Amino acid sequence: MSNLICINERPVLINHKTYHMPYINVNNDLPGIRGLMAYRPETADAMGALANILLRDTQGLSPAERELIATHVSYLNECFYCHHSHGEIAVCYLNGDRELVDRVRKDYQNAPISDKLKALLQIAAKVQKGGRQVSEGDIANARDQGATDKDIHDTVLIAAAFCMFNRYVDGLGATTPTDLSTYPPRARQVAEHGYGSHIFSKAQPTM
Amino acid sequence: MAHIQVPEGVPGIRSLVLFRPETGQSLYDLAQVLLRGESPLTAAERELIAAYVSSRNDCHFCMSSHAAAARSLYGDRRQLVDDVLTDLQQAPVSNKLRSLLQIAGKVQILGKLVTEEDVAEARAQGVTDRELHDTVLIAAAFSMFNRYVDGLASWTPTDPAVYDEMGKRMAEKGYSLPQPVK
């Protein structure tokens, strides 16, 4: 197996040990945040509940739009595990349109998405840099495109939450599969059954 | 004024969770288990990590309130909180707590900045898996809370007395979701 992978389109040689063994002994071999959540289910409960509301609420933003925001922020935070995981969940909601997800991930300004979603992604990208980066102009722009208070709230909180999830995963060096074909089965599991303790307490999906 | 219509006169994250209690409940649950639940780190140490990360994120509301909570929990040793916020390297904290705060500082910038060397250094000071886990997750969570509070421009009181009282309440009662005023 090659340990040459691409991060942000740059091929990077990954030290096998650094990339595959978490900094703490999580007593399991589950990938990414799943391994960390299984290690500490008490904090996992609250994080799973948060993800379920933020990413699967169908009022206002669609689940696909919510996952696209999560994917873009995770890409900006250079979190390989999260941007591929959430990118694949967005692919599930978008009937397999991986090309669209890839364009939003890397260059949303020129992607074929609504002006409203572009305006919200702009706010999310500012939040990724720091909360104070969001300007009155960014908010006014989103409102001009039809964004409601709830859309703006959820966008800011999704972006903020992924600044947490991404740091949790990379800060503890969580196990990160480099084989991209392992991501779609887990993505389908989440798209169908949601977030929550089942993603680490049940057998991992392989199909 | 906040970027969205939240209850007037309610400060910081409290106003935001009143706007959206569904997500608010999970956020308060996370804060309670992370900062008050079972952990090898004391509540005071955990509040100090939260205040340190919030200070680095320039989030005045979170920094002031969690620093006040940490001062209240540290009691007679309260000066330590301001020493850490002023200059971590010179602050009279144990080498172990300093190494955890240094890792929290890296997480604040970006998760992938934490290296095997940082972890080895912390281990040499006696840091355990659970201490490392809780430190990274507290730092990550405040990278969220800080962005939530400032990204929506929630009201940040400027009177220090407001934070003293808030910190005392947080130290004594922990985190439970604010209820709307009837």
Image: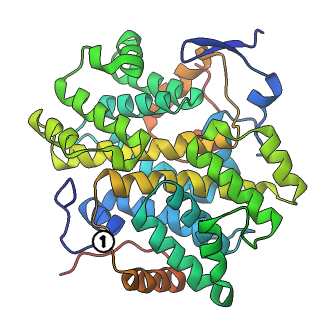
Tell me: residue A91, above or below residue A191.
above
Visible in this render: residue A96?
no
What kind of residue is marked 1? Pro
Label 1 element class: loop
**Residue beneath disc 1:** B11
- Quadrant for the N terminus of chain A, please: top right
Q: Quadrant of residue B101?
A: bottom right
Q: Is residue B15 left or right of residue A68?
A: left
Q: In the rendered image, which quarter is residue A134 located in?
A: top left
B171 lies above or below A10? below
* Residue B93 x %, y %: 76, 71
Give the number of marks: 1
Work out which quarter of the rendered image holds the C terminus of chain A and state it.
top right
Q: Which residue occupies 80% across, 46% down?
A: B119
Which colour scheme appears in the figure?
rainbow
Q: Nearer the viewer, residue A202 or B34?
A: B34
Query: Where is residue B38 drawn, in percent x and y?
Result: 68, 70
From this viewpoint, which residue is outermost toward the bottom?
A: B76
Q: Is residue A54 left or right of residue B81?
A: left
Q: Which x, y percent locates residue B136?
A: 65, 52
Q: Is residue A6 above or below residue A155?
A: above
* Residue depicted at 76% across the width and 9% down the height: A2
Q: Chain of mark 1?
A: B
The residue most toward the right is B124
In this view, the residue in front, B172 or A94, is: B172
The image quadrant that residue B114 belongs to is top right
Say whether residue B176 is left or right of residue B84.
Answer: left
Task: Characterize the local packing of mark 1: few (<14), some (14-19) or many (20 or more) Cα atoms within 10 angstroms.
Answer: some
